[in-house]
Image (tube, grey):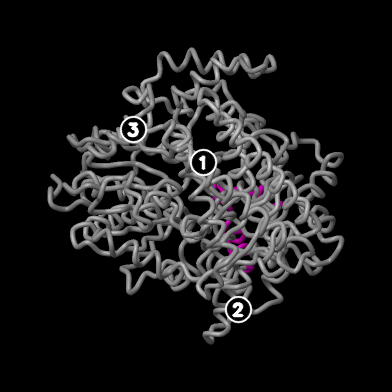
Amino acid sequence: MTDPDDIGALLGAEGPFARELPNFAPRPAQQEMARAVQHAIEECETLIAEAGTGTGKTYAYLVPAMLSGQRVIISTGTKALQDQLFFRDLPKVRSVLGARLKTALLKGRANYLCLYRLDQTVREGASFDRQQAAQLAAIRAWSARTRRGDRMELAEVPEDSPLWLRVTSTPENCLGVECPFYDDCHVVTARREAQEADLVVVNHHLLFADLALKQEGFGEILPGAQAFILDEAHQIPELAGQFFSQSISARQLTELAQDALAECSGVTGAIGLMLEPIEALQDAVRKLRLALDPLPTRGSFHELLQRDGVPASLRDLGELLSALTDVLASQAERSRGLMNVHERAASLMERLDRITEQHSEQDVRWYELFPRGFSLHATPLDLAAPLRAMRERTFAAWIHTSATLSVAGRFDHFARQLGLDDPQALSLESPFDYARQALCYIPDGLPDPAARDYTERVIDAVMPVLQASNGRAFLLFTSHRALRRAAELLADRVPWPLFVQGSAPRHQLLEEFRASGHGVLLGAASFWEGVDVAGEALSVVVIDKLPFAAPDDPVLQARLEALEQSGINPFMGWQVPAAVIALKQGAGRLIRDVHDRGVLVLCDPRLTTKGYGKLFLASLPPMPRTRELSQVQAFFAPVLNESGEPHAAMRDSFSDTGS
């Protein structure tokens, strides 16, 4: 019998999970984490829990969350993980525990079909091409049968189809209670269910969008909770930066102008008043984008203001946006749509003023360019203060968990970024036997990563590994330029199926890679995390360089300067820890199961030539290391003893190479 008061025992060998779930393996680390989460919820504490791959952290926080008797919000890194948690993991845990509680899944507005905008799109009868017409027909048919209205249900219409923009709403164009479809609105239904639920599953984007809205006093989407559990918490610092920023984009301004024009129909005399200021604003957006054209893709506001013509173009844009806002104010009472557009214009004008006029020492002002547009931003230099204030307002427990939060066993960097003062901290080793399941290979003789032929040399070093493994590899790159060059070099050199990021949607590439059995997949940023390929299909992970953040990032530059002024070495205090966590994410793609075996190939020579290289190596799972290609080849063709294990001499030779 298990002790009903010991939450860890529920996940033990004598507990209900072991009895009722096939293939459930009791893990001491999982039980320890469950107890720590339970304690944090009960005592309203802040907890950092790093749980190595295979620990079973999802059950470790779901069990105490469900049994807490408190309202809990669980936030995940992506919508795909959110769906997996809600539709797969949560029902299993609830069934085993016999827990009777209300649960809800809540996503951002853009994930739900808007019945009003679908009706508008159908009525407009726009001239769609054959593919889009078929997609619209599929959406109409689905709209009649869906209960949730969640786009993820309709796989036959691609996620990146431009049609979704026409049949989903934004906070700006939503008509609210005056919408003729309000009673059947999927967004309203999802939010109502979330307000009434004991446990709500959200994603980080939605969580921070809501918390940022609350900070500005606009109201709240999510219900108040006694505990927040953030899975994939290593993503929080970057996401928080987005949501505590002030931003305005060319796209927002263009959509404002288009929607203002559309709202004039049916309002007598409105088009005569507004056509000129609308067209003038659209022209000002185009002129500003043209003035920005010679600048780098992203940079500081100071750099932008040095460019001839840009300050004048910014002033013109502000004046014309102000003029359109005034005209809209005079017409706002004539229709709900015009009132909505006026509110948007006023909000955008306020944002533009704050970004262009304020010279706050707390903000980093910067810009980013796109092929047909631009965005302007003011981002807080230090996120710790707003994040700390946000947590304090909730009077709740905050639990942060991920497989990658520490640097050489310490949580200082993560805690400093989030303003976590004296948190409870827990580090749980993966149950995988890395000494037997994995080998880390650091090729000898590679040049400095800045060398012009570096990617060519990396591919030369990797080819014998791919031959030994018979493909079955991820090659992860720190830049898209290196990825493209590697794809060119490998196109005629590999006999295995080659999958290159950008040639097809991410999920399709992964499905085809798994099915191929011997594929070689080349990926950059988005493939470094959240990718799970268990089994023999993935037996090699290659990382070309240490993943230091781009040095041209204006926000990073400003933060590094601020650290230096406060007496902290910015390289060792920020850049190295951030790169260590990113490297751990990439390396984590290799071993996903107790039966996996594989080789991690780290090509960057700085791991052994620079002092900070030891910090990276000390942060990786405890796998043996080698510089000898022959040992990689032996790993994939091991000499077995009678019991089917590698000979002790071979195991020792691997172990001797590491340190």
1 or 3: mark nearer the eye: 1
**Label 3 amino acid?**
Ala
State the residue in front, 260 or 32.
260
Look at the numbered disc 3 and give the secondary structure of its residue: helix
What span is in magenta? 633-657
Left or right of 135? Residue 404 is left
Q: Is residue 638 magenta?
A: yes
Find residue 646 and report its horizontal and vertical position in percent: 58, 52
Q: Is residue 374 magenta?
A: no
Find residue 441 and report its horizontal and vertical position in percent: 67, 60
Judging by the rendered image, the residue that carries numbered circle 3 is 190
Disc 3 crowd rating (10 Å Cα; few below 14, some 14-19, many 20+) is many
**Label 2 amino acid?**
Glu
Judging by the rendered image, the residue that carries numbered circle 2 is 561
Left or right of 373? Residue 353 is left
**Label 1 amino acid?**
Leu
Sequence-first disc among 2 and 1:
1
Q: Work out how far the residue at label 1 is from the one at label 3, CA to CA, in angstroms.
A: 32 Å
Sequence-first disc among 1 and 3:
3
The extreme bottom residue here reads 567
